[in-house]
Image: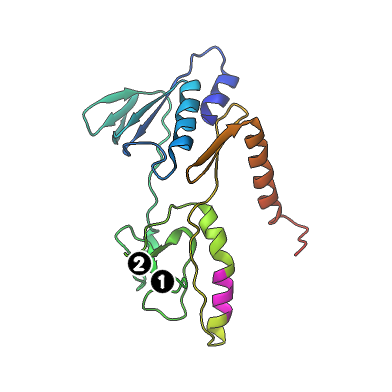
Amino acid sequence: MSVLAQLRQRRPDVAWKGAIISASPSLLPGAGWLPRRLVLRALQRADIAVHAGLRGSALVAGGVNTQAGQRIDADIVLWATGAVGQPWLEQTALPRNERGFISVNTTLEVTGHSGIFAAGDCAAFGQHTPPLPKAGVYAVRMGPVLADNLRAACHGAPLATWEPPRHVLALIGTGDGRAIASRGAIGFSGRWVWKWKKRIDARFIARFNPPFTH
């Protein structure tokens, strides 16, 4: 939606339309019905067609071929792939799951490797724990527990466990000065949500820019 908004602003002489091809049978499958409905409404407003349950198979001249044998015409293609483990991890003895992520327990310690920890997108919990979305909010919340456990490991102290939050806030910009907020079954949208998102993002980035206050 944001890309289309920029294209329409820069080239108003072109009648831009968009399309989303998604292998998932529905968009935002982990969100509640209200956030999903708000997103679909925003996509319709932006003149973006949704092809759910359809997997792209190859880029071809002038479009995308799908595994169903269809061809969807396109002048510009943004190909968003799923996350996988980094190739260099294959050269280590660290245990990994089927997608190449490092296996950890609830203390963020690598399974079977005392004193080695992994957190963020590269980490994956055991098979009895539902996989977490690869979203930065989880990595940020792992940080304090990781820091505490690194110190504890250096002193031979007991390790603390990290429990992922049941619901996290997702803020989705729609490219028109608005945004959609999603948290579990709750969803709402508006220009004020976009302003809220910008404040949150700016405050987070400011923590990593000098001068540091902490």
Residue found 54% across the figure and 23% down from its top: 7
Q: Position of residue 23 (x, y in %)?
A: 31, 38
Residue drawn at (53%, 88%), measured in percent from left and top?
156
- Regarding residue 179, the answer to whether it shows in the image is no
Magenta span of residues: 145-151
How far across and down, in percent of the image, does residue 166 sit?
Answer: 48, 56
Upstream in sequence: badge 2 or badge 1 = 1
Q: For residue 126, which numbered disc appears in the image?
A: 2
Label 2 Cα crowd, 10 Å radius (few <14 / some 14-19 / many 20+)? some
Q: Gap in Å between the C-alphas at discs 2 and 1?
A: 7 Å
Total numbered badges shown on the rendered structure = 2
Q: Is residue 126 above or below residue 12?
A: below
Image position, residue 204 (x, y; %): 66, 52
Tell me, yes or no, whether the two marked residues, 2 and 1, touch with CB atoms within 8 Å.
yes
Say few, some or many: other residues with alpha carbon within 10 Å of mark 1 (under 14 / 14 to 19 / 20 or more).
Answer: some
Q: Nearer the viewer, residue 74 or 113?
A: 113
Which amino acid type corresponds to the residue marked 1 in the rendered image? Asn
